[in-house]
Image (cartoon, helix red, strand yellow):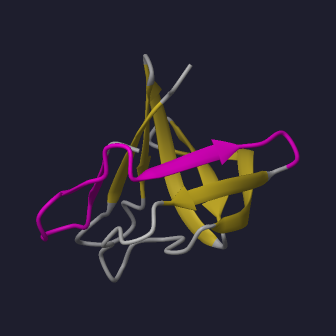
Amino acid sequence: MLEFRPGLGPTGIYNGEMTWLFKNNNTLDVNIVNGTSLWHNFPMRNTGNYPYLINDAITVQSSILVALNGQAWLYEIDNNILTLNDGFGTEPRFIMLERIP
């Protein structure tokens, strides 16, 4: 994982401290290194397995809606960077993930 932008707060950089593995069975494996400090509003704050669902039928501003552990996010893929955006409020959160080959 690269970074988390919690709206108006400062950006959290998590280089090598966290990995997300999206699986074909609509589950997301999250691994967080012990001792990693996360923002209070960071989704999936614990190492574990979480459900996700990509809804191709619903698009907002050319992005497809994805539900991660019950939370709605928009996503964009640019080269090897996946950006998730919960841009439904006045202070949207962003999560940026880098694809690891």
Location of residue 61 by image quarter: top left
In what quadrant of the picture does the C terminus appear?
top right
Residues in magenta? Answer: 3-25
Quick check: 79 left or right of 10? right
Q: Is residue 41 magenta?
A: no
**Where in the figure is residue 48, as x and y percent of width and height?**
68, 67
Seen as rendered, the residue at the extreme bottom is 40
Seen as rendered, the residue at the extreme front is 34
Question: Image height check: is 26 above or below 24?
Answer: below
Q: Residue at x 50, y 43 (%)?
A: 75
Q: Nearer the viewer, residue 91 or 61?
A: 91
**Where in the figure is residue 27, as x and y percent of width and height?**
78, 55
**Where in the figure is residue 33, as x and y percent of width and height?**
46, 61
Location of residue 31 by image quarter: bottom right
Q: Nearer the viewer, residue 48 or 75?
A: 48
Question: Image height check: is 51 above or below 64?
Answer: below
Quick check: 42 left or right of 70? left
Q: Is residue 17 magenta?
A: yes
Question: Image height check: is 30 above or below 63?
Answer: below
Q: Residue at x 88, y 47 (%)?
A: 25
